[in-house]
Amino acid sequence: MKEKIIIFDTTLRDGDQSLQHSLKSNDKLKIAKLLEKMGVDIIEAGFPISSPEDFKSVNLISKNIKNSTICSLARCKNEDIDIAAKAMSNSFSRSFRIHLFIGTSNLHIKYKLRKNFEEILEMAINSVKRAKKYTNDIEFSCEDAGRTNIDNLCIIIENVIKHGVTTINIPDTVGYNIPTEFSKIIKLIINKVPNIDKSIISIHCHNDLGMAAGNSITAIQSGARQIEGTINGIGERSGNTALEEIIMAIKTRKDILNFYTDINHKKIYKTSKIISKICNVNISPNKSIIGSNAFSHSSGIHQDGILKNRKNYEIISPETIGAKNKEFNLTSRSGRAAIKYHMNKMGYSEDKYNLNKLYKNFIKLTDKYGRIFSYDLEALAFLKNFKKESNYFKLKHLKISIKNNVENNILIKLVCGENTKICSIKTKSNIIYAICKIFSKTSNIKIKLKKFKSIFEKDKNNLINKVSIIILYKKNKFYGEKITSNFIESYTKSIVNVLNSIWKYNKIIR
């Protein structure tokens, strides 16, 4: 019989600690509601003693969340515990969890807390007694458990369980442990603590050595039944265990992981993207499960295998997490199978074009420019003397001035074939959309900005800006990308690239 793994989310507490700017209470509530809809069992809403805003957030979340248990963090101090309980006193469900923690490793005891082990044990027991006045749902964390003497660890665990702790958390606070080592710690606790059956073992791993997910999986195989982590793996330093990785590992490898969660898997992708936006933390393209490349395929061998059976190169289908199937990346690594697939999808049977000739020209183009798109492939197949650089539109001049920090004045000179058009507008709208609007007006091509992404990177000693856009034109998506040292330059050149792609596209469909 499968056993349930409790999912404990600390995005709003440990995740929030790592952000450049702490989340406001309304943003935290938005995230809490997303986690609730996803089916998260326990939401650690914050650390109320740390700031008035955190207290406000925990209080607001407690009042509005119905189906997830709300938890607050507290040091082993009376004031912390009282404030944590007060923040959750108006909880919708009338039940809540207090999460106590104290350092237990010799390093923490001696240098951080400047006490001895007996004093730490006494503080732990007294704190549990204090928390017990407010709730029966008490979690206790032995901070830096991964580097704590195992005998001392077991003594503390036995004593706090004896006084009412219902969940024991074993954190790898600094991401120091490796899976075999962490698994051994869990097994020793189970074997050496006589009353361990009275409490659920939880684990909270950090990713400093890239071991967070591995440590978490081996821990549940060894007897832990609660996993703590964050969405997208955000958190102190290198981050926490990424919950989406654990959740999908349990689902995907059910052949050897005899567990289940109550998570609605189809909510994972949407939740991840919204949290990324609210927290202003970009997701790495190669991030497992939810990265933009997670279901992308560039290699010709892989693309051919996917076309024959997606399971050849995908162990998870995008639909499982609520994402859409992605088109193949058309790059110099793509093969004839991918080209044929894209042409067929656009409605062109193989007798309408020469596949070998198209492939030869395709390789030349992609070797020079990198990734191209379906409409580029279409132009390559049917436009005579097609050249990527033979552009109809060229930006000659762009001037932007802002009046009273409110009104934008934009002037543009755009070369359109053999003519140069000049256009100016005054607008109070967002500068990003205003620039797109004036390009649309000047080129006489009705476009709409669908998606905009800007990434600042450092190239040696220079700051560069990479802008990626998606433009809608007659219900079709067109993609533009440019890298320069200037944000506006990158953005405007991306639009010009899109306009040229649309111009070539129109020549084909006429």
Image (spheres, helix red, strand yellow):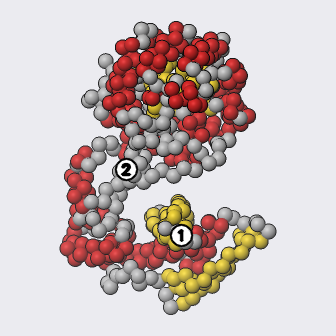
- Write the residue at 65% across / 14% down: 130
Residue at 55% x, 29% y: name it: 108
Pinpoint residue 246: horizontal percent, then vertical percent: 40, 35
Residue 397 percent location from the top left of the image: 60, 83
Foreground label between 2 and 1: 1
Label 1 belongs to which residue?
462
Amino acid, disc 2: Ala
Q: Residue at x 63, y 36 (%)?
A: 29
Residue 46 location (% of width, % of height): 62, 32
| Label 1 Cα crowd, 10 Å radius (few <14 / some 14-19 / many 20+) | few
- Helix, strand or loop under label 2: loop
Query: Which of the two residues, 71 or 127, is positioned nearer the viewer here?
Result: 127
Q: Relative to 86, does residue 273 appear above or below in the rendering? A: below
| Residue at the farthest bottom position | 418
**Based on the displayed image, in which of its 4 quarters is residue 122 positioned?**
top right
Question: Is residue 359 shown to the viewer in this render?
Answer: yes
Q: Amino acid at mark 1?
A: Asn
Q: On the rendered structure, is 350 left or right of 172?
A: left
Q: Viewed as shown, does residue 144 lie left or right of 191?
A: right
Q: Secondary structure at mark 1?
A: strand
**Which of the pair 376/21 is nearer the observer?**
21
Residue located beneath label 2 in the image: 294
